[in-house]
Image (spheres, rainbow, N blue to C red):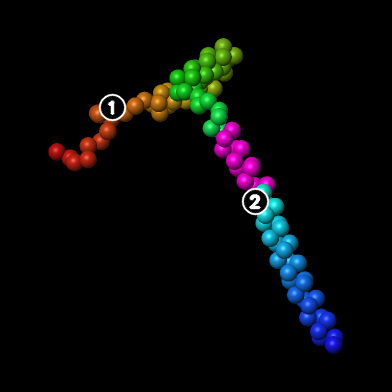
Amino acid sequence: MAEAISGPDKLTSRSRMRLSKRLLIILTLTLAIPVVWFSVFRSAAQSPVTCEAQYDTLVKQAKTELTAGDRTAAINSLIAARNKLRDCETPTAKDVAPIFRN
């Protein structure tokens, strides 16, 4: 008779663990999905900054650094502005390497 009583207790403890695992998974998904959802839409809602605006900011930053007397930082900002212009350029036909060599 003692075996009959302990048998169902083991099943209920296992079912309780399964239920708690399921509840934990559901709770985690319930919290994670809105966080991911809103972070994606927040980044999509922000207006993308154009290359010209980024270039202008770097040049203005270089100017303020130069007036402050920090020549090294101004040169670094101007180099970053030059690189930004290179990144923003659309490649022309001469910039693209040919597929077949002549």
Which amino acid type is marked by label 1? Thr
Dot label at residue 29: 2
The answer to whether 14 appears left or right of 69 in the picture is right
At x 85%, y 88%, the residue is 1
Residue 79 lies in the magenta stretch = no
**Marks 1, 2: nearer the viewer:** 2
| Residue identifier under label 1 | 92
Majority secondary structure of the magenta segment? helix
Residue 1 visible to the viewer: yes
Q: Residue furthest bottom?
A: 1
Q: Nearer the viewer, residue 64 or 29?
A: 29
Tell me which segment is drawn in magenta.
31-42
Residue 58, placed above or below residue 11: above
Residue 74, placed above or below residue 35: above
Residue 72 visible to the viewer: no
Q: Residue 41, image x and y in percent?
A: 57, 35
The answer to whether 67 appears left or right of 31 in the picture is left
At x 45%, y 23%, the residue is 51
Q: Nearer the viewer, residue 6 or 87?
A: 6
Q: Residue 64, image x and y in percent?
A: 56, 14
Q: Residue 52, image x and y in percent?
A: 45, 19
